[in-house]
Amino acid sequence: MGVDRYTSSLSTADEPRSFLDHMAAWINWRRFLVSLGFIFFITSILFPFYWMISSSFKTRAEIGARRPVYVPGALRLEAYQELFDPQNPNYKDFGINILNSIKVAVPTSIVAVFLSVLGSYAIARLKFRGKEVMLNSILMIYLFPGVLLIIPLFAMLARIGDALGFAVQDNLAILIFTYLAQTLPVALYMLTNYFRTIPSEIEQAGLIDGCSRVDVIWRITLPLAIPALVSVAIYTFMIAWNEFLYALVFLNSRDMFTMPIKINAIFNDPSPQPHVVMAASTIMTIPVVILFLALERFLEEGLTAGGVKG
Amino acid sequence: MSVIAEKKKTPLLKGWNTLGAREARLAWLLILPTAFIVFGIVIFPAIFSVWISFHDVGLDNLNNVFNTPFVGLENYRQVWTDFAFKFQGLQSWGAAVTSIVYSLAATILTVLVGLIASLLLNRKFRARGVMRAIFLFPYVAPIVSVAFVWRWILDPRPSGVLNDVLMSMGVIDLPKAYLATRGLALVLVIIFEAWRYFPFAMLMILARLQAIDSTLYEAADVDGASIWQKFRFVTLPELRYVLGAIFLLRLMWTFNKFDDIFLLTGGGFGTKVLPVLTYEFSFKLFDFGRGAATAMILLVILLIFMGLYIGVVMRNVEE
């Protein structure tokens, strides 16, 4: 629309102005640099994703060609069929691994939201001694590398498992516990900051009207905090969905593998089959990206909450 | 929990039932599950790992870990003299030096790219929301997927995308094994880190940019400042605090990061960093004592980083 107005006011002759003329009238150094920047960012971000999805539709012949095939001949599902083929001894059916990932990520997300609501409400609203120490020591988790914790965890859980009679290896419940420890601090931090933005007068009004604390939390605070709850749920879900190191150490049998470990196993298969790896990666990536796009606004709020004061 | 309640009630049980004490009890009750999980799975293991680093713990005596022999500093000595760890000249950096160089370079690049991206997006234009969402893709996508896509793009065969592009442009004659070339592999891993994590820096910076008082720019316009001067004397000082915070956070996270390098190069070709070395000692050689010792060295370097940062950077910011 803006361009049309431009044309009518500037073109004196009857003939339509060419595309190049438009460009020449529009461009200046600043716009040139900005456009260049955008082109650079967009191509370097989107090409890997295009490459992942397009490679997943290629045939074995297209994958093994001497030169890369930039656009697959057709949307062939060869790679996906191979991925879900129960007969194939190397991949078996990927469906089990998808299910395992869901079994780990969904409970992690639900429990993390529940526990962090309790904890962050206490930190944001109630006065008690040792609050700061507690918050700081929980945030210290940021400091500890995962590889440092996994050795003692492995030793400790092996000992406890022996005593109580449960297996540590290939135990998805154990995995959920370790993911909770990784996600709770972030969840707590995000929610505490959000609760602090809800005026406490609203709650006090509820208390004066005779509601109990639990009523106040359930009927007043939580409904107000839904954006933050959604973002914590998605965030913890994504962490559990993507986690690699702990799953690599704790899972041994192919039937128990979560998706990241399975994809790693397929990648390291003696006969490399990039199209199958890309098909599996696509399946793993699409849900997260869709979740993210659908709930982007909530997520960004959560990501930056409190991190940029002052 | 009870200790604190105890303290409160010492003056003849007075205050046990006051509103304040009831509130404190409720607070502890609410926070207890979180504290329990975090303590059991993070704080206690962290302390336990100091203990392990002084003992000879292998796969055979893992079930009886509390009775493993005490070996003093033997694990540390072994790590210190390991060829994978120590610096042996410029050809072979060793894990400690590689880790430091890698995390500093990757963090600086990440913050720089994030700054540029946030400046690009901090303007009003159509499709801005879409652009913003696309810019966040690398950060949101699972690490396994993006690492393998990049490996597939950098494939050493002539059918690799980068090989094909560079060969048809005539830059190289023969296909290169990018991730299997010493030096180049480290550079590529650093670029990958910036590609994946710049959105985090971008979001933080963008939020701060939008909070800058617009009258500052109006004043600069009145004074006839150029775009560069406005950036240098208005934007940058306003961003100093947030840039510092992002730098520290990302430095720590990059230093601790295992997945990225493990998936991209497996720690070969001059990219072996301390987390990967820790993993190899513990879960390839099953020498948990040596692994724990490596992790402790990692932690000490991390603490030195933080100390330096707080001592130097934070003080400068305050002045």
Image: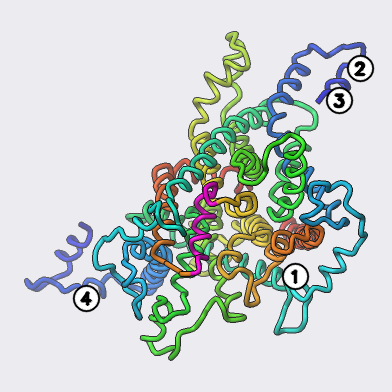
Q: Position of residue A197 (x, y in %)?
A: 58, 33
Which amino acid, mark 3? Val
Tell me the chain of label 1: B
Between the C-alphas of marks 3 and 2, the distance is 11 Å
Residue beneath disc 3: B3
Residue beneath disc 1: B96
- The answer to whether any part of residue B212 appears in the image is no
**Mark 2 or mark 3, which is nearer the start of the sequence?**
3
Residue beneath disc 4: A20
Q: Where is residue A127 in the image (x, y as percent from the top left)?
A: 73, 26
User: Could you tell me if the residues under marks 4 and 1 are in contact, i.e. CB atoms within 8 Å?
Assistant: no
- The answer to whether any part of residue A171 appears in the image is yes
Tell me the chain of label 4: A
Which region of the structure is painted magenta? Answer: A254-270
Between the C-alphas of marks 4 and 3, the distance is 78 Å
The colour scheme used to paint the residues is rainbow
Instruction: Single out the mark in the foreground, 4 or 3.
Output: 3
Between the C-alphas of marks 4 and 2, the distance is 85 Å
Which amino acid, mark 2? Thr
Left or right of residue B113, residue A56 in this image: left
Q: Do labels 4 and 2 share a chain?
A: no
